[in-house]
Image: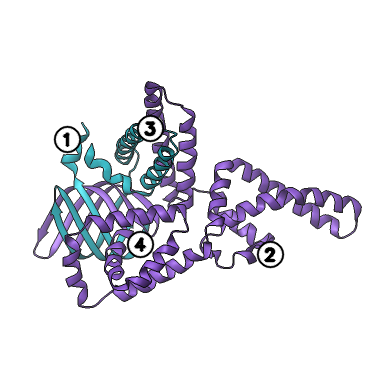
Chain colours: A purple, B cyan
Amino acid sequence: MEGHTFSVYRGIIDEVLEKARADFQAEGADERVLDELRMMWENKLLMTNAIQPAGVLVEEKPVQAALEAPPQNAFFPTDLNYPPPPDLPTQEYVSVPHSGRGEASSSAAGGEDKPSTSANEGLQDVKRRRLSELGPGLENAADGLASASVPSVGVTVGSDGLRIRGGGGGDEDDEEDYNEEEPEKPPEVKEEVRALEELEVAGAEEDDLNELDDEEEQKEEEDDEAEATANIVLAQFEKVTRSKNKWKCTLKEGVIKLNGRDILFNKANGEFVW
Amino acid sequence: MASMELYRRSTLGTCLEATLDELVNQAAMTPLLAVKTLMHFDKAFEDALRDRVTTKATIKGHLHTYRYCDQVWTFVVENAVVKTDNQEEHVDKLKIVAIDAKFGQLASR
């Protein structure tokens, strides 16, 4: 399913860039920017984990990191949510000197050390090759990820959970939602902004937390709406009907953002009870 | 065309917008080219969903909020179950934003 989304998304990227190339040519703009655009776009997409292409590095890397480099992980004790990023830069820097040392030690000291170092060397080589296949863009992005304080992500997620529970059931819910209906735009815009921040995993999330401390009540209201928009269906409707409290709708050509992943559909039926 | 801007809120769309923002801020491309690129995206996304996606989905749940405004239906569904061809997922809340298919067709031509 996700593999399918990935291939469709890649097709869209190709098509958009092809059309944009014509625009660039018409305006005499530098077409090399398009290469950069593709790289940045694809990297951002991979970072979100919204699309997990079949048979990917993204899933292999953390396993390798856990097995081979426990000391590195010790520097990122709370990076369970984002294992691959910290892995990338450290590999880059560690692997290069290692290969040199590995050769030296293996040639100088024989015996039991030899097989293990050469095996390590081989793995490092494989990793380095993988890294170079990924291209420099991802390294940069990974650097960004690593430098952005990773722990703050975990904290934010945790507090989200708390806020959700806090604002969850109860009689107040209904009243709040009537209020929410009118100022629809601002929370949505905020949600978009927040999504962008998450994509870049910028340090800005810490500010988010501070704001929460300051105006907890207000935030709770907004978070109700934010939670509603975290899982979202974007589509076209063909028909919406209601009989008594039962609603039915026919949707087409939509995308579902569900638990952080994108699912595409051609047609969808909705059946709701009010 | 304008109505199809809703797909910009997909993950692919937000990533493109962020990228274009960066490139425009770096003066690597003009805002006009960025806007044109977004319009290509709107079209390409819709075309891809129509022509290259065959998945069917069903969504069930408790309708918490409904509204219809400017040819856009918005539903907030609680305890939603989303079924696609080979998987089923539950979420506490799901928001559905759907534009009129007829309006979309007219607008994109």
Location of the C terminus of chain A by quadrant is bottom left
Task: Mark 1 vs mark 2: tell me if same chain.
Answer: no
- Label 4 to label 1, Cα distance in Å? 34 Å
The mark nearer the N terminus, 4 or 1, is 4
According to the image, label 4 marks what residue?
A: B89
- Say which amino acid is labelled 3: Thr
- Real-space Cα distance between discs 3 and 2? 46 Å
Amino acid type for the residue under numbered disc 2 = Pro
Discs 4 and 1 share one subunit: yes
Q: Is residue A185 left or right of residue A153?
A: left
Which numbered marker is on residue A210?
none
Most extreme residue toward the bottom is: A170
Q: Chain of mark 3?
A: B
Query: Which label number is shown at residue B106?
Result: 1
Task: Determine the chain carrying the residue at label 1.
Answer: B
Labels 4 and 3 share a subunit:
yes
Numbered tag placed on residue B30 in the rendering: 3
